[in-house]
Image (cartoon, grey):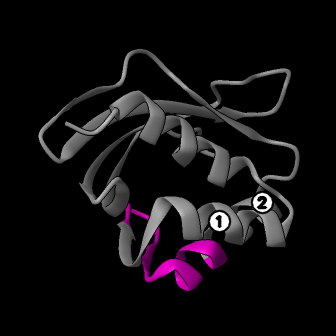
Amino acid sequence: MTDAAYIADRYIAVWNETDLVRRNALLADGWCEDATYVDPLMRGDGRDRIGALIAGVHERFPGFRFTLDGCVDGYGDKIRFSWALGPEAEPDMIKGTDFAEIEDGRLKSVIGFLDKVPANA
């Protein structure tokens, strides 16, 4: 069993990293090269494309931060966790739940669901 909480913490760290060099290092450390990410709004195949999606989120929501929301759950090579995203004044403006598959301690695939999205986001 992979340490689900550790994987989720690393996932959040990647999404919060604004420095391109550090974000790419976190992606290389925590994601398989051919990893996939998909949610209702975007899809990325491979670490480079996933990194570009993350950069796009930073451009659209400057100053917003991701946090884990609740407990991380996992078994075998699968984990599930919820997160919140927002500015300091409203840190849970946007919320979601992600399901991930792990391979050799790295994220292989992530499927995201949006649980709370304001009309203006």
Establish if 34 lies above or below 73.
below
Quarter of the image where one finds residue 33: bottom left
CB under 8 Å between callouts 1 and 2? Answer: yes
Q: Residues within 10 Å of mark 2 (few under 14, many from 20)?
A: some
Identify which amino acid the numbered label 2 is placed on. Answer: His
- Of the 4 image quadrants, the one containing the N terminus is top left
Q: CA distance from mark 1 to mark 2?
A: 6 Å
Quarter of the image where one finds residue 72: top left
At 79% from the left edge and 63% from the top edge, which residue is drawn? 22
Left or right of 101, for residue 55: right
Query: In this rendering, does residue 121 appear at all?
Result: no
Residue 38 position, x and y percent, is 36, 67
Q: Which residues are magenta?
A: 38-52
Label 2 sits on residue? 58
Give the numbered dot on residue 54: 1
Q: Regarding mark 1 in the picture, which secondary structure is present there?
A: helix
Residue 15 position, x and y percent, is 64, 52
Establish if 105 lies above or below 49.
above
At 69% from the left edge and 72% from the top edge, which residue is drawn? 24
Q: Residue furthest top?
A: 70
Along the line of sight, the residue nearer the viewer: 89 or 34 = 34
At 72% from the left edge and 24% from the top edge, which residue is drawn? 91
Q: Is residue 47 within the magenta segment?
A: yes
Q: Regarding mark 2 in the picture, which secondary structure is present there?
A: helix
Establish if 56 lies above or below 72.
below
Identify which amino acid the numbered label 1 is placed on. Answer: Ile
Residue 104 position, x and y percent, is 29, 59
Left or right of 51, for residue 70: left
Establish if 1 lies above or below 88.
below
